[in-house]
Image (spheres, coloured by chain):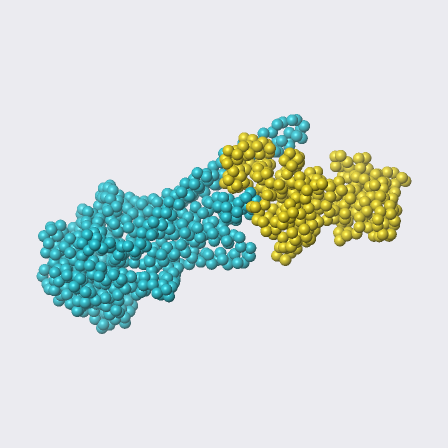
Chain colours: A cyan, B yellow
């Protein structure tokens, strides 16, 4: 039985900690792959230190966690004090029930309702930016509060009522009595509450996601937006650091607790000894022999030492001061803040010895324009994310970089501003005519292209016959049954079928879509899996051998492929093309600086840095005509990114995904559900 | 002429509509050891808390050296309290607990150190400075609590059942010690207890309370020998309380017999309560007795036997040093000075004879009182 329970505990611990152990292990991996360990290195930690984006998010998270946990602890302790002193049992119980709602409530509901509240109140007050650091702080304090109350209230209950009375009896005002006597008595609960709030705030994603504004992005939100492309080992490094911080905090709070328990146990033991001594004394008295009884010495105290309490108090005070300064710094209006909202990992951020483009822009503003500008860079995961944020009308971004079909939708809904190209002289200079007048912005009013790309077929040359490659048929080839990966989203998956059949991907004819479905159903038994991000790992390790994906991402896979894999790439004749372009939304508050930013992004150094970092093709002449760039990327990679055998504008027009009408979208979704549920 | 230190005038207090104190009038002299005695729920602790400043009276005046202090908060009163459960500060050691009051008053550390060691020797706790208070025995905690209060040199020390949580032997020792401390320091002690023996042995003045009212104030001897009504007679010591008729001055009739007594001043044939203490009854042969009855039970108590005698259907308790056999027919003799006559009161007839014995019941009520407070 004992053996079994040990085994069981071992199993549970293993299941709990194996993922974390793996993550920590791979954070020291030299290579980029998240599957193959190529050697020990601290590379990703160094990288992390260089990435201003991640460090900034980490700093934000820490500021928010410290500020919100402190405020929640103070308010929560006061609340617990009030609840404890409530005489009416029913009022107390109902207050406790209300207090517990945020704990029981699904986070997403708390998040959404808080967002609505902020937007509503912000609207009443006539604010332009309704979501910002302060709303996030309020949200975090809100969900941390009940945990503080839950930890502190029992301590109040354990404390005899006579304690504060005794203090007042000895000359303390009620205020002094609270700080000198009650607070030390409830201190363990307060500390636990503080640490819990801190960790909860630090790792909260859902509520932060809904209540964050333009100026403040926390780590979990950033990490989430980075998962659009493959998860980088820097995230492992970061997660390892966060895990260790939280582990240390946990150890501290447990030490406090266990020292308290030790004390209790000792107390019980001392009491027992004393009772025995008394019994012996009685016995001795009964025998009428005079025995002097000495009470056994009480053990020395091992409780929360006043020293530790003082240290904690000192640390707390320091933290409050630091937080306050930083917050003031954020709130200071001396510098102009430019809010940029972009995809995760979609800008050169200083890692890997690259150029930190945002910082370069800040320097440029300072040195050339004489403006103290600060780029506030936050990220999203999908176009739909971006759309959701913009349509709340509670945020304010100055520059956004959506994809083509989303630009069309935003423009049609009046969510974009026309650009003043006088402020973007680089536009005429750098952007080729073939990237102008495209479907999403036919009059070149709203957008400046940032990147573009094409979907191609990636295959492992060690598995796939050279004769079979060249078109979409490879993905329907029965020879490679169980080796093929398909997109796990409707638009892209139907796209492959439509291109294969030579149909118009933007048709509204339901019959066409039915035909697409039939084609996909034919393919289903051949598939290994439908995937999105997992495609990287599966292709790099050889788990699957054929997949359709973006050219830029193929280059990343080649870099990380295992030794026995030989990934190759080709474009079928008809394939998807996309453009991501910089726009200024109508909520922008700083249009001129935003245009300055767009112009800067087109400048040679910044554009090359971005193109090299993102690995997608750049529509910027200064990039694709640069010898340095070509050399850095390598001849092969360059040829793949910039195929020369067709006219971009024509091909784009025929094959891009346009924003479909609602009815068609719903129809596609129903077909997609039928396909994925039955298979 | 003794100085009146504290005066309570017509104090009333109710909790949730329940009257806890009604019209309490009391004065306390300087240097006095006064005890508020009564069963649980009689209002004695509330009276103490009003003096300490933890409750405000609904009506009436509380005077301190002639000044009204109803609204003076606890921390500004020159009064300190020893709480029932000591209420020591668990996060501080013995030294810091005792020094607490002086530190609040910003006394210099040097002086604090001197006064704390003075206090420690007063309560016999030298060498305990660094101990954790929660690891001390009950008696030691008690001493720390007393030292912590006394170090502030209050004019009045309030003690709320300070010995209730100690075992019997320790309680006896502490009683002596407390009395010594009071004599040594000359501080006025206001002591709350439900233990009548404690009250009688320590106090200069005993205040017997019941149902939120003061029943009797007097020296322990007065209270014991001249209880004012049936409640006091029953609560303080053992008593045989009988219905009687005052025939005339110095003549009372009860138990179908007319006795001579020392009491006078009642109306002729006034219905009265008569108290005869068990130890004042002499057991004599039947033919010499004023009354006679059959012994129903005999209990050996060490110093004496406690016997229950059925006389005309009323069960008397008698303490005698001579052994009497159960079921024996005996006579009893009562001296005139052993008879105490009281006016009828609301408590008359509430306390019957000794047909049921109440040791166990007393004990149970002790426990419930502990739980409550």
Residue A30 visible (yes or no):
yes
In the image, residue A531 lies at what x, y percent? 25, 57
Asked if residue A514 can be seen in this view, the reply is no
Between A380 and B189, the one lying in front of the other is B189
Left or right, residue B32 beside residue B332: left
| Count of numbered circles in the view | 0
Q: Residue at x 87, y 52 (%)?
A: B268
Which x, y percent locates residue A273? Answer: 56, 34
Kindly identify the residue that appears in the image at 57 percent across and 32 percent down: B118
Quadrant housing the N terminus of chain A: top left
User: Looking at this view, is A557 or A171 the one in front?
Assistant: A171
Q: Residue at x 22, y 45 (%)?
A: A31
Front-most of residues A569 and A291: A291
Picture residue at 60% right of the left edge, 29% below the top: A293
Residue sticking out furthest to the right = B287
Position of B294 compared to A234: left or right?
A: right
Place of residue A668 in the rendered image (x, y in percent of width and height, measured from the top left):
26, 68
Q: Where the C terminus of chain A falls, by quadrant?
A: bottom left
**Residue A640 versus residue A433 in the image, above or below:** above
> Residue A288 placed where, x, y %?
67, 28
Report whether B272 appears left or right of A66. right
Question: Quadrant of the rendered structure where residue A271 is?
Answer: top right
| Camera-side residue of A281 and A678 | A281
Which quarter of the picture shows residue A473? Answer: bottom left
Q: Is residue A504 above or below residue A264?
A: below
Q: Is residue B14 above or below residue B294?
A: below
């Amino acid at each position: 039985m004992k053996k079994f329970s040990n085994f069981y505990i071992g199993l549970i611990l293993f299941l709990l900690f194996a993922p974390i152990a793996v993550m920590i292990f791979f954070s020291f991996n030299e290579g980029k792959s998240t599957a193959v360990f190529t050697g020990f290195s601290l590379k990703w930690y160094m990288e992390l230190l260089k990435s201003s984006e991640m460090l900034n998010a980490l700093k934000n998270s820490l500021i928010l966690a410290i500020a919100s946990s402190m405020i929640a602890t103070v308010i929560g302790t006061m609340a617990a004090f009030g609840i404890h002193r409530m005489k009416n049992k029913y009022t107390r119980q109902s207050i406790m029930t209300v207090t517990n709602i945020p704990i029981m409530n699904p986070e997403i509901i708390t998040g959404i309702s808080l967002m609505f509240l902020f937007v509503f109140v912000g609207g009443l007050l006539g604010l332009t930016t309704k979501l910002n650091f302060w709303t996030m702080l309020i949200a975090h304090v809100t969900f941390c509060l009940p945990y503080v109350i839950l930890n502190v209230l029992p301590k109040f209950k354990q404390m005899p009522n006579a304690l504060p009375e005794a203090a007042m009896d000895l000359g303390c005002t009620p205020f002094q009595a609270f700080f000198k006597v009650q607070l030390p008595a409830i201190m363990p609960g307060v500390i636990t509450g503080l640490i819990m709030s801190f960790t909860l705030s630090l790792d909260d994603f859902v509520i932060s996601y809904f209540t964050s504004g333009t100026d403040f992005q926390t780590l979990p939100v950033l990490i989430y937006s980075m998962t659009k492309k493959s998860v980088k080992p820097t995230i492992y490094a970061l997660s390892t650091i966060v895990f260790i911080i939280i582990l240390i905090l946990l150890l501290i709070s447990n030490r406090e607790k266990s020292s308290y328990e030790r004390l209790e146990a000792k107390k019980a033991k001392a009491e027992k000894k004393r009772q025995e001594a008394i019994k012996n004394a009685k016995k001795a008295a009964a025998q009428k022999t005079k025995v002097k009884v000495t009470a056994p010495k009480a053990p020395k105290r091992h409780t929360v030492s006043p020293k530790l309490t003082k240290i904690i108090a000192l640390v707390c005070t320091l933290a409050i001061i630091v937080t306050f300064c930083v917050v003031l710094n954020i709130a200071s209006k001396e510098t102009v803040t430019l809010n940029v909202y972009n995809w995760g990992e979609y800008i050169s951020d200083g890692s890997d010895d690259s150029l930190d483009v945002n910082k370069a822009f800040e320097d440029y503003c300072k040195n050339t324009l004489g403006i103290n500008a600060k780029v506030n860079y936050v990220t999203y995961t999908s176009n739909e994310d971006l759309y959701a944020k913009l349509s709340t009308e509670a945020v304010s971004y100055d520059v956004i970089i959506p994809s083509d079909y989303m630009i069309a939708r935003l423009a049609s809904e009046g969510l974009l501003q026309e650009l003043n190209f006088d402020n973007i002289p680089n536009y005429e200079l750098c952007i080729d005519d073939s990237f102008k007048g495209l479907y999403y912005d036919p009059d070149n009013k709203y957008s400046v292209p940032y990147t573009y790309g094409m979907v191609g077929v990636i295959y492992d040359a060690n598995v796939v016959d050279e004769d079979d490659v060249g078109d979409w048929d490879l993905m329907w080839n029965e020879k490679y049954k169980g080796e093929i990966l398909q997109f796990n989203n409707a638009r892209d998956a139907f796209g492959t079928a439509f291109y294969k059949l030579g149909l118009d991907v933007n048709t509204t004819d339901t019959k066409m879509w039915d035909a697409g479905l039939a084609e996909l159903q034919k393919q289903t038994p051949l598939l290994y899996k439908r995937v999105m991000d997992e495609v990287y790992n599966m292709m790099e390790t050889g788990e699957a051998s054929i997949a359709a994906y973006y050219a830029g991402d193929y280059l990343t896979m080649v870099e990380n492929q295992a030794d026995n894999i030989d990934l190759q790439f080709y474009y079928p004749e008809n394939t998807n093309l996309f453009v991501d372009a910089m726009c200024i939304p109508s909520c922008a508050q700083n249009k001129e600086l935003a245009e300055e930013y767009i112009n800067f992004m087109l400048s040679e150094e910044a554009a090359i840095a971005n193109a090299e970092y993102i690995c997608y093709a750049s529509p910027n002449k200064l990039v694709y005509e640069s010898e340095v760039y070509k050399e850095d990327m390598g001849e092969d990679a360059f040829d793949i990114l910039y195929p020369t055998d067709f006219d971009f504008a024509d091909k784009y027009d025929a094959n891009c995904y346009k924003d479909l009408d609602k009815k068609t979208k719903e129809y596609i979704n129903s077909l997609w559900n039928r396909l994925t549920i039955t298979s | 002429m003794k100085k009146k230190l504290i005066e309570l005038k017509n104090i009333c207090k109710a909790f949730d509509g329940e009257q806890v104190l009604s019209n309490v009038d009391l004065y306390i002299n300087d240097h006095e050891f006064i005890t508020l005695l009564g069963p649980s729920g009689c209002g004695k602790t509330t009276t103490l808390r009003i003096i300490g400043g933890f409750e405000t009276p609904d009506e009436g005046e509380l005077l301190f050296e002639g000044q009204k202090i109803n609204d003076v908060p606890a921390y500004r009163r020159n009064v300190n309290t020893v709480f029932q459960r000591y209420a020591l500060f668990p996060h501080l050691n013995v030294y810091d607990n005792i020094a607490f009051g002086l530190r609040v008053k910003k006394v210099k550390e040097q002086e604090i150190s001197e006064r704390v060691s003075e206090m420690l020797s007063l309560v016999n706790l030298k060498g305990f400075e660094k101990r954790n208070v929660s690891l001390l025995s009950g008696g030691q905690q008690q001493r720390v609590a007393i030292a912590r209060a006394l170090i502030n040199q209050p004019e009045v020390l309030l003690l709320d059942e300070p010995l209730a949580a100690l075992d019997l032997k320790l309680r006896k020792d502490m009683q002596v010690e407390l009395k010594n401390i009071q004599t040594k320091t000359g501080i006025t002690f206001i002591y709350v207890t439900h233990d009548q023996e404690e009250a009688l042995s320590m106090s200069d003045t005993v205040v017997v309370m019941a149902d939120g009212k003061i029943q009797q104030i007097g020296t322990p001897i007065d209270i014991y020998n001249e209880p004012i009504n049936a409640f006091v007679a029953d609560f303080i010591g053992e008593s045989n309380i009988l219905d009687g008729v005052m025939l005339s001055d110095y003549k009372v009739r009860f138990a179908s017999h007319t006795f001579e007594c020392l009491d006078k001043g009642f109306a002729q044939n006034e219905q009265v309560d008569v108290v005869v203490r068990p130890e004042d009854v002499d057991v004599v042969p039947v033919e010499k007795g004023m009354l006679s009855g059959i012994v129903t039970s005999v209990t050996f108590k060490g110093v004496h036997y406690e016997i229950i005698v059925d006389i005309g259907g009323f069960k008397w308790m008698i303490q005698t040093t001579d052994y009497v056999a159960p079921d024996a027919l005996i006579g009893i003799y009562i001296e005139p000075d052993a008879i105490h006559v009281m006016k009828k009161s609301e408590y008359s007839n509430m306390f019957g004879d000794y047909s049921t014995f109440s040791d166990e019941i007393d004990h149970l009520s002790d426990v419930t009182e502990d739980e409550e407070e």
